Image: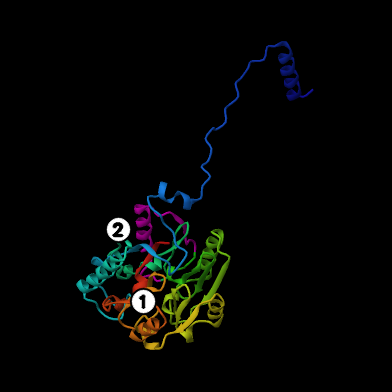
Amino acid sequence: MTMIKKEMIDLDQQMLDGELTNIKAIPGERWFPLETTIEQDFKEYWGGDWGCSSEYTKLRAVLLHRPGAEIDNFDYNEVRFRAPVDPELFRAQHDTLADYYRSHGVKVYYTPGVRPDRPNAVFCRDKLFMTPEGAIITRLAMEQRRGEERYVAQACADIGVPIVKTIAGDGIFEGANATWVDRHCCILSLSVRANRSGYDQMVAELTRQGVTDIITMQIPYGHAHIDGLLNIASEDTVLLHACQVPYEVVDRLKKKGFKILETPSLTETKYGYATNFVAIDNGHVVTSNLAPQAVELLEKNGITVDVLDLSELNKGRGSVHCMTAFLKRD
């Protein structure tokens, strides 16, 4: 007879004889999960009402980086600026943009700072892509910008924006390589600023959140982001640089009911940032003053356009959309 079998027989006999010690059962946890979605938790537990799945609905909150000491003394060629900048004018124009947002009811948040050798830090869209459930912290491509992501992540932690994903591993993906079409459709691009690993990580996260329609856009060599070639001004109007946007992307947008407007000037598109605007509401955008022909085209097609002098900021090869990370849209 094995030892285990003998012990079982002994326990059975003790039970029959009433000699077995009664050991109380260990109780259950008795704490049950609060079965809500993270979106339902925003106001109660995260200190705000966050989320975005549009490029044109009412803008409620943004994250900016006010330029600091990092723009006082730097080699503009090394960081891909077009020309040297006047630091005070650079800051003043950024303040003008922030004040514009506030005047239209948009809450403005700022990053806590940045490394002193990162003058491109003003371009916040590249570092954060907002989703209905929270922020995706991206991973920047250029060595001269790598590490800026840390300060955007810190800002999210400080103000209570949940971080649902960080592009990791060998993934590279910048926020301006993604554009919302609607809650279930998103354009994601591959480019010098977005590799396949980063793209796949974005697809996985957005699919988890219920995005069922991913439009893939290949960005040509010589361009960086979607917002330099295409942007959505309203629920039915898209402005794009015709010779650089793949037909498949145009066709998909057309079939979704968008009117396709083509930028009238290559010069304005590349050097005047014609598509680099921000919609503060459906059919109401803010842009820089370097693309008057594009402004006229938008206005002729029913779009209200507010124009700001951001010419000093534009020396950094970006404009309004590049500088603005959305945190909340209706």
Q: Position of residue 112 (x, y in %)?
A: 30, 58
**Numbered label tally:** 2
Q: Is residue 206 magenta?
A: no
Residue 87 shows in this picture: yes
Q: Position of residue 247 (x, y in %)?
A: 55, 83
Q: Residues within 10 Å of mark 1 (few under 14, many from 20)?
A: some
> Quadrant location of the N terminus?
top right
Residue at the farthest left position: 88
Q: Nearer the viewer, residue 212 or 200?
A: 212
Q: Amino acid at mark 1?
A: Thr
Residue at the farthest right position: 1
Mark 1 to mark 2: distance in Å? 33 Å
Q: Position of residue 178 (x, y in %)?
A: 47, 70
Q: Is residue 156 magenta?
A: yes
Would you place residue 326 above or below residue 305 in this image? above
- Quarter of the rendering containing residue 129: bottom left
Residue pointed to by mark 1: 304
Give the structural element (helix, strand or loop) at label 1: strand
Magenta residue span: 142-169
Residue pointed to by mark 2: 112
